[in-house]
Image (tube, helix red, strand yellow):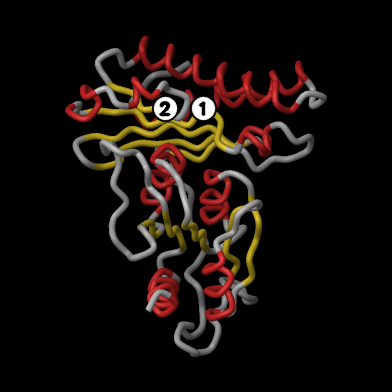
């Protein structure tokens, strides 16, 4: 494993954890999904915690799989550098044979901002990282769509696509899609959804109704490094390493589409 800087480290750790998860899938099979999910969460968490303790021993870590006591450790809140990790984002999809929409997240927060991050998509054979941020597709073409205006078109033509949860798409996002003339695309993990924005499979991801910092820190770091828009659904900034790690809503989109979506969301919440 090469250790040149934090960007490379995030990518290396996410990719290696992903390779280990793929091997675990092959070893365990899909006969007992609950056992596969539990083992995947635990083993990926253990690998990332041990690697960060060895390679960045003075840094703090916030992991989805940490104990409640570890999450409440006051040293994290006063630390200048905190790694925010989700060892297995999309546990449900990980344990379903053939599904590729699960991920590993590794992000670094420093003094109030995300400075490095990587999202490994092991079953897709790729890792998106701030070391080499993805090049975004072109901006949406056509008139803005909100408050009854004409639908906005995606790069290359066609209707805008918005990624949503497979299992619990927010009702207001269905209304937003109708308002702006968009299609909804169900995708598994949050990391896979945000990555789909960055790779051109969709143009936006909108979610409300419950998430945590580890669900979005790494993909948001990569999205911001790529020049994408990332915010709360009211347009305010996403903040990390908070006492309460709940971060219940998010909008990630191509930058030219963000004003349309934010205006539509405001209209729906009036």
- Mark 1 highlights which residue? 87
Q: Residue at x 54, y 64 (%)?
A: 203
Instruction: Report the front residue among 230 and 165.
Output: 165
Q: Are marks 2 and 1 in contact (CB under 8 Å)?
A: yes
Real-space Cα distance between discs 2 and 1?
Answer: 7 Å
Q: Residue at x 54, y 27 (%)?
A: 15
Q: Residue at x 49, y 60 (%)?
A: 206
Q: Position of residue 226 (x, y in %)?
A: 41, 52
Q: Which picture quadrant has residue 127?
A: top right
Q: Which picture quadrant has residue 222?
A: top left
- Secondary element at image label 2: strand
> Is residue 232 found left or right of 261 in the rendered image?
left
In this figure, what is the number of numbered marks?
2
Q: Is residue 78 above or below residue 142?
A: above
Q: Which badge, 2 or 1, comes first in the chain's sequence?
A: 2
- Mark 2 highlights which residue? 63
> Is residue 95 found left or right of 119 in the rendered image?
right
């Amino acid at each position: 494993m090469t250790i040149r800087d934090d960007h490379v480290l995030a990518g290396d750790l996410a990719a290696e954890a992903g390779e280990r998860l793929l091997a675990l899938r092959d070893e365990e099979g899909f006969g007992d999904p609950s056992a596969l999910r539990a083992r995947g969460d635990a083993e990926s968490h253990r690998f990332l915690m041990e690697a960060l303790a060895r390679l960045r021993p003075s840094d703090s870590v916030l992991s989805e799989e940490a104990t409640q006591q570890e999450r409440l450790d006051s040293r994290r809140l006063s630390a200048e550098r905190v790694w925010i990790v989700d060892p297995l984002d999309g546990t449900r999809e990980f344990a379903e044979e053939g599904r590729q929409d699960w991920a590993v997240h590794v992000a670094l927060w420093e003094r109030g901002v995300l400075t490095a991050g990587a999202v490994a998509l092991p079953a897709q054979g790729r890792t998106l990282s701030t070391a080499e941020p993805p090049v975004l597709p072109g901006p949406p073409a056509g008139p803005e769509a909100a408050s009854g205006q004409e639908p906005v078109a995606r790069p290359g033509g066609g209707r805008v696509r918005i990624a949503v949860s497979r299992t619990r798409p927010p009702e207001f996002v269905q209304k937003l899609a109708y308002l702006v003339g968009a299609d909804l695309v169900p995708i598994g993990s949050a990391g896979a959804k945000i990555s789909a924005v960055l790779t051109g499979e969709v143009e936006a991801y909108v979610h409300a109704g419950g998430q945590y910092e580890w669900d979005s820190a790494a993909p948001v770091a990569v999205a911001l490094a790529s020049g994408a828009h990332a915010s709360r659904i009211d347009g305010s900034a996403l903040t990390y390493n908070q006492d309460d790690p709940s971060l219940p809503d998010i909008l990630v989109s191509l930058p030219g589409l963000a004003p349309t979506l934010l205006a539509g969301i405001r209209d729906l919440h009036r």
